[in-house]
Structure formats: structure tokens, C-alpha cells
Image: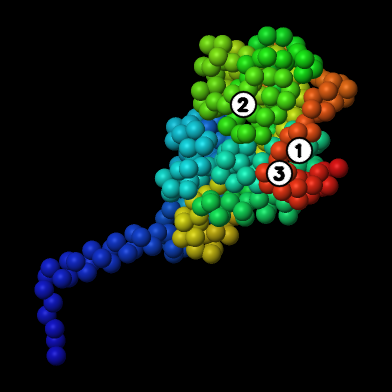
Amino acid sequence: MTLSLPKKFIRSAALAIGLCAIAAGPALAKDKLVLKAGHAASTSNTGHKAFEFLAKELAEKTDGRITVEIFPSSQLGSERELVESIQLGNVDMTFISSAVLGNFNPEFFALDIPFMFKDREGVYRVLDGEIGQNLLASLEKVGIKGLGYWENGFRQLTNNKKVIKSPDDLKGMKMRTMENEVHIAAWREEGANPAPLAFGELFTALQQGTFDAQEGPINLFYDMKFYEVQKFISKTNHVYSPWPVLINPDVYQRMSDADRAILEEAVAKTTEYQRDLARKADDEAVAAMPGVTITELTPEELAAFSSRMGPIHDMVKKRVGAGIVDAILAEVN
């Protein structure tokens, strides 16, 4: 017996099958995937170059099936907005300052205690080891998949007023910080008058005198042309800032096992490339800014800053538990 189905039914069934195929996304290895990647840095920054490197790796390893479309310079929003877009699925990938993630998962505040990290070797032991990988895994409970850590770098104190060698020199200065309660509290302990501001708005705020001081890695200071509005850098190395590399978990899960393996291998290779770029970029930035006064602080001068951080240790331990803070300190000391 042969059944003759109405044309309307056939059209509806075809449409339903098509919609199911779309909903399934890139579940099969043969499916093409365009990853929409946004970040807040400039196109000359090492993070942007890393995304370009990652895009090339993925395209080569998949014969062009997986490509990356990059939107730099906060085109898709501030760092906080980029994280929210990852959660919502409006952006597929990003790298952002780890300090911003503390607002989504407080465990990341443990990385923000000033003067914990002495050198990059200690940093990498923490980030690439069990502590850092557990932090990335913990993001999944808030709708984010962490893939690794790129390097933003050790953060320095800059201002447009004078050479700063002690907390007393900083007293009362209007200072921009990231949107992170640990950073704000730490600079208040140092005597500054801190307030948060989105990174994309910072140059104009410094130019207009809304802030006297700010802090961040030297290579980022150079990339964003902050040397045009800030003439003094104190090398405090107070915080090491990693850039966690994030992906929307639904996009990640829809990828085939083979493609997920390709992605993770490509991110690992890109991490090596980007960290090497970042290390060199700090030295190159210093050499390219002869008009900026860069002050190396003595161990005694640095101790005057770090000695004020006791309340910040207590604050973070109360917020996230002493376990992770003590584990980091044990790893780096």
C-alpha cells in the first residue's frame, strides 16, 4: 500500500529537518564553523596577534572548515560585556583580563592579591598546573568554557604628575582601576583614590584629567598610546595579569571530538607563541618610549607597598577561602 502525503506536509517536514540540522550546529567534522572572536585590545597587541595565529592554525588543521572572525578594540563591548556575551552565545571566543572574571566567579580574585608573584616561572607553574586548570574548570558552572591562559603581563603603576617611589607619593591621586573589588581595595590601602572604568574609555579619561594615575602592563601602555597622556611609570610588578582564553560552552560541545582536540592543540601552540611575544613586547615598549620616565624601585621601596597588603590577603581569604590563596603562595615561594 502506497501512501500519498500532502505537499503541505512534505514542505513542513522538510523545514523541520532543516531546522534540526541548523540547531545541531557543527556537530559533524565536515561542518564549517566560523568562530566570532572579540577582544578589547588594539590590533598591534600581542593578544590580537595571537588570535590571528590561532585562526591560521585552525584553518590549516581543518582545511579551512574552522575559521575565526576577529573583532578588536572593544567593537563587541567592554571586557565585562564580552564575558556576558560568551555566556549568552552572542560571542564565541574572547580573551580578557582575569581580574574581570572575579565578578563572575570569585575564585579568580585569588590571582589578584598584589605582590604574590615574583617571576613568570612561578606564574606558569600556577596557571598551567592544577590550580590554574581548576580555576578554568570552575568557570563552567557560570556558563563559560576556559581553554588556557595567554599573557597580559606584570602590571606597573603610571601617572601624569611625578615620580612615585612610595605609597606616600601616591596619596590622594585619582586612579583608574579595573572593575575588580580586590584591585580597588588594594589601591585604597596604598593611599590612592581609586575608581573603576572600562578599558576602552581610559585614554580619553586620562587625557581629560578625570584620572591622574592608572596601572597595567607596559606593553599595553605602549599599544594604547598612554604615553601621550602619562609621563611616569613606576615598575612595581604588583600583579601578574593573565588573559584567560574563553569560548562559549555550547559552541565547544557542538564540535566533534576531533575538532575539539584540534582546537585545544591550536590554543596550546598559540599560548607558547603569544607568551613569547608578550615577554619581548615589554622590552620593546620600554625602548620605544624615551619620553617617559621609568623608575625601577628598590627592594625596600617595593616592600613599602607590599607591606600594606595584609588586609587584602584577609579580604580575599574571607571571600574565596584560604585554601586556594595558600596553595598559590606555596607554589610560588
Give x and y (percent) for residue 227: 63, 15
Instruction: Tell me the mark number nearer the camera, choosing from 3 and 1.
Output: 3
Badge count = 3
Which residue position is annotated with label 2? 177
Q: Earlier in the sequence, mark 2 or mark 1?
A: 2
Q: Nearer the viewer, residue 252 or 50?
A: 252
User: Residue 279, relative to residue 331: is it above or below?
Assistant: above
In which quadrant is the C terminus drawn?
Answer: top right
Q: Residue at x 15, y 71 (%)?
A: 9
Q: Residue at x 51, y 23 (%)?
A: 201
> What residue type is disc 2 on?
Thr
> What residue type is disc 3 on?
Lys
| Left or right, 247 with reference to 193 | left
Element type at mark 1 = helix
Q: Residue at x 49, y 60 (%)?
A: 253
Q: Nearer the viewer, residue 261 or 141?
A: 141
How far apart marks 2 and 1 lie (CA) works out to: 18 Å
User: What is the quadrant of residue 4 in the picture?
Assistant: bottom left
Q: Are marks 3 and 1 in contact (CB under 8 Å)?
A: no
How far apart marks 3 and 2 lie (CA) works out to: 22 Å
